[in-house]
Image (cartoon, rainbow, N blue to C red):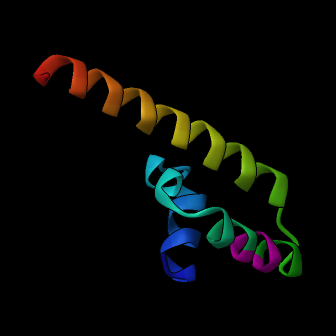
């Protein structure tokens, strides 16, 4: 995922941030810290979004299995 995409998802607190890899989030956090933003929030959004995506995928698999 590009840094530009991740910044957009971070500032929109969008679920799409959950699709980023852990390496991607680390890159985003470096940029956030360097620019005076809270990197901890990025980790929380990523973890919550990834959990939500996993839950939706599990529900879909159950529904269409």
- In the picture, measured across the screen, residue 56 lies left or right of residue 26, that is left
Residue 37: percent from left, percent from top: 82, 66
Q: Does the magenta stretch include residue 30?
A: yes
- In the picture, measured across the screen, residue 46 lies left or right of residue 2, that is right
Residue 22: percent from left, percent from top: 66, 62
Residue 38: percent from left, percent from top: 84, 59
What residue do we see at 47% from left, 56% from top?
19
Q: In the displayed structure, would residue 33 be above or below residue 63?
A: below
Overall secondary structure of the magenta section:
helix
What residue do we see at 23% from left, 27% from top?
61
Which residue is at the front of the view, 60 or 32? 60
Residue 26: percent from left, percent from top: 75, 70
Q: In the displayed structure, would residue 14 be above or below residue 35?
A: above
- In the picture, measured across the screen, residue 56 lies left or right of residue 50, that is left
Q: In the displayed structure, would residue 36 be above or below residue 20?
A: below
Which residue is at the front of the view, 63 or 41? 63
What residue do we see at 42% from left, 27% from top?
55
Q: What stretch is highlighted in magenta?
A: 27-31
**Residue 47 picture quarter:** top right
Outermost residue on the front side: it is: 65
């Amino acid at each position: 995922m590009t840094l530009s995409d991740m910044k957009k998802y971070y500032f929109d607190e969008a679920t799409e941030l959950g699709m980023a890899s852990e390496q991607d989030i680390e890159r985003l956090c470096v940029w956030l810290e360097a620019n005076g933003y809270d990197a901890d929030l990025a980790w929380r959004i990523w973890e919550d979004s990834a959990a939500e995506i996993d839950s939706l995928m599990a529900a879909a698999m159950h529904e269409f299995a």
